[in-house]
Image (tube, grey):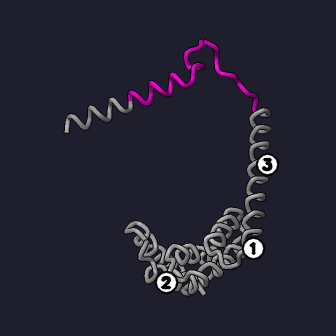
Amino acid sequence: MQNRQMLRISGVAMFATLLLLSNPSVFTAEPASRNTPEELIERFKTTQTKQISQQEQSEQALRELVKQNPSAHKVRALLAQSYSTRRDFKSAVAEMEEAVKLAPQEGTYWHYLGGQYSATGQPEKAVEAYEKALANGQQLGSRDRAEVELSIRKVKLLKSLIDSSR
């Protein structure tokens, strides 16, 4: 036990040393640059614009791949995730529905589709997709299985609360 702790400590120390050596500015006495709030806002806007542009390019490439190979379920799943990141849940649902049609044995696709149905206010479909995730999810780990089971309980609870308030 003591040897493991020493190995961990020495590993952390080695990592810290490498980090310090790889960044020589740590050893200079120059003060850190101070940016004005306006400069920080401008940097944020620039970074955000670049990220949006990169995501749009990625989405375009994925759409082209789907056109070239409509049966590429993994590409469709990636495109669905990209749509979801942009909060375009309707498109995300449509792509993931295609992915599960092409690969119904993929429990992770069903899990993801259940989340999309839940996000679009379709609790019955969400529960159905989550149940299919469990039934088809041989590759789901115990953590994923627990997450799917929890999602089912959450959706059912929310649905019952909504129904009782009507």
Q: In the rendered structure, does residue 18 fall within the stretch colored magenta?
A: yes
**Residue 36: horizontal and vertical position, in percent?**
76, 28
Sequence-wise, which precedes: disc 1 or disc 2?
1
Please state if 109 lies on the left or on the right of 7 as rendered. Answer: right
Secondary element under disc 3, as helix, strand or loop, is: helix
Residue found farthest to the top: 29
Magenta-drawn segment: 13-37
**Residue 22: horizontal and vertical position, in percent?**
54, 25
Q: In the rendered structure, does residue 9 fall within the stretch colored magenta?
A: no
**Residue 118: horizontal and vertical position, in percent?**
59, 76
Question: What amino acid is labelled 1 in the image?
Answer: Gln
Q: Is residue 36 above or below residue 143?
A: above
Please state if 54 lies on the left or on the right of 128 as rendered. Answer: right
Q: Nearer the viewer, residue 28 or 4?
A: 4
- Please tell me how crowded label 3 is: few (under 14), some (14-19), or many (20+) other residues with Cα within 10 Å: few
Q: Is label 1 in contact with label 2 (beta carbons under 8 Å)?
A: no
Q: Is residue 16 above or below residue 127?
A: above
Question: What amino acid is labelled 3 in the image?
Answer: Thr
Question: What amino acid is labelled 2 in the image?
Answer: Lys
The residue where tag 2 is placed is 132
Q: Is residue 62 above or below residue 124?
A: above
Sequence-wise, which precedes: disc 1 or disc 3?
3
- The residue that appears at 49% across and 84% down in the rendered structure is 132
Judged by depth in the image, the label closer to the viewer, 1 or 2, is 1
- The residue that appears at 77% across and 68% down in the rendered structure is 64
- The residue that appears at 61% across and 82% down in the rendered structure is 102
Q: Quadrant of residue 24?
A: top right
